[in-house]
Image (cartoon, helix red, strand yellow):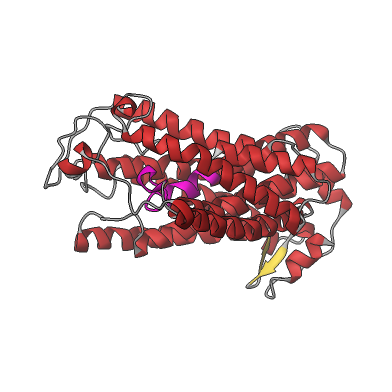
Amino acid sequence: MATHIGVQAISSLDTYPTSTESSQQIASTTRMPWYLWCIALAATCNTVGIPWDISWHRTIGRDSFWNPAHVTIYLSAVFAILACSYLILPTTFRRNSPFRPFSVRVLGLRGPLGAFVAAWGGIAMLTSAPFDDWWHNAYGLDVRLVSPPHTLLFFGLRGISIGSILLVATYVNRAASHGDEAAYRAGQRMLLYLGTLLVIDISIFLIDFDSFIKWHSRSPYTTIALTIFPVLAMMAGSLRHRWTATILTGGYMLFNIAEILFLPLFPAQPRLGPVYNPVTHMIPMEFPILLIVVGVAIDLVRQRFAGWPSLTDTFIASTLSIASLAAVSWPFANFLMSPAARNRFFGTMYQSYFARPERILHPRFDLPEHGLQFFVSLLIAVLFGTATLWIGARLGRWVQGLQR
């Protein structure tokens, strides 16, 4: 039922009856199909390339469009289009294709729903490439991460991430329906991996909103409630695992901490002026926000309430998540402002070459809130989180039943 509802919601799609024989042929394999590994590689290139590119801009500036970070990012589009072409083109032109019973129809083409989403993402990314190159040549280095070409790139990246999750989810669901435990477990592990990458990817594009200098104001809490909460709820709803949200947020934190430890090992220097802060090594991103407490809170509520996801359950989960996040982030932000955090692990001494000296020597919180004002801001975040958790959990149930 969930599959039919989800597919019918897309007016331009036509579905075809399933075939038990073809389903067993695709799902009941001892090894993951190559196209799933290829689409996972595409998602990995996204997650590695974007923070590398940000570090490149913060350390070196703008030198060449064909730098290694950019190449890694756009390889993601190549891998995604390669895998999706294998799924869409034969399914469209061959009536005996094993994927045909699980296909949907879009603009006369046939293929799995996830393949169309990921293919659109790859095309959007390749379209953004010359746009981004022109933008930098015309306006120079970005002051903020959010710009028109980066916005198009962001939606392309999300298309690949979500499309890869849908493709693997259909593989897992077919394996579960045919009792193939080996394929089911392998698919679940890949889903956990892809879900972690999605959390990392979204958090990267939030750096203008959730920097630790903002942790005493509403911005990070509302932003996380609107963007990260639905992803955690969707993945928790689609995976049959007790600690899905905890694993995803833990993976996010480990990745970002590894970046802080790894990138400064490589020497580099600015090639673009003006240089306010001479740097000699690659500059990583900030220490990650403490999302692990959000993951634990969501998983505990899911395990406690059998009726999940009712609005009451999501309200409790949102309240516990926002309260826990604020309780640990407020004092932790004070710590990151202190000289004690200027070390290789927390990395607050790593600043861009264009960072002003006064910002480095005298960091300040951005628009701090206190008392009733901060409480109201957290309450607004809780209400947003209640809605997004409920929506994400419903999407997770739909993904759990997806077969096409």
Vertical relation: 275 (above or below) 84 = above
Picture quadrant of residue 336: top left
How many numbered discs sit on the rendered protein? 0
**Percent of width and height locating residue 52:** 36, 40
| Residue 200 seen from this side | yes
**Percent of width and height locating residue 264:** 30, 28
Vertical relation: 305 (above or below) 152 = above
Instruction: Identify the residue at horizontal 80%, vertical 45% (top origin).
Output: 305
Instruction: Identify the residue at horizontal 67%, vertical 43% (top origin).
Output: 298
Q: Residue furthest left?
A: 274
Vertical relation: 261 (above or below) 305 = above
| Residue 33 seen from this side | no
Instruction: Identify the residue at horizontal 60%, vertical 51% (top origin).
Output: 229
The stretch drawn in magenta includes residue 155: no
Picture quadrant of residue 111: bottom right
**Percent of width and height locating residue 141:** 23, 54
Quadrant, the N terminus = bottom right
Q: Which residues are magenta?
A: 199-215
Vertical relation: 108 (above or below) 152 = below
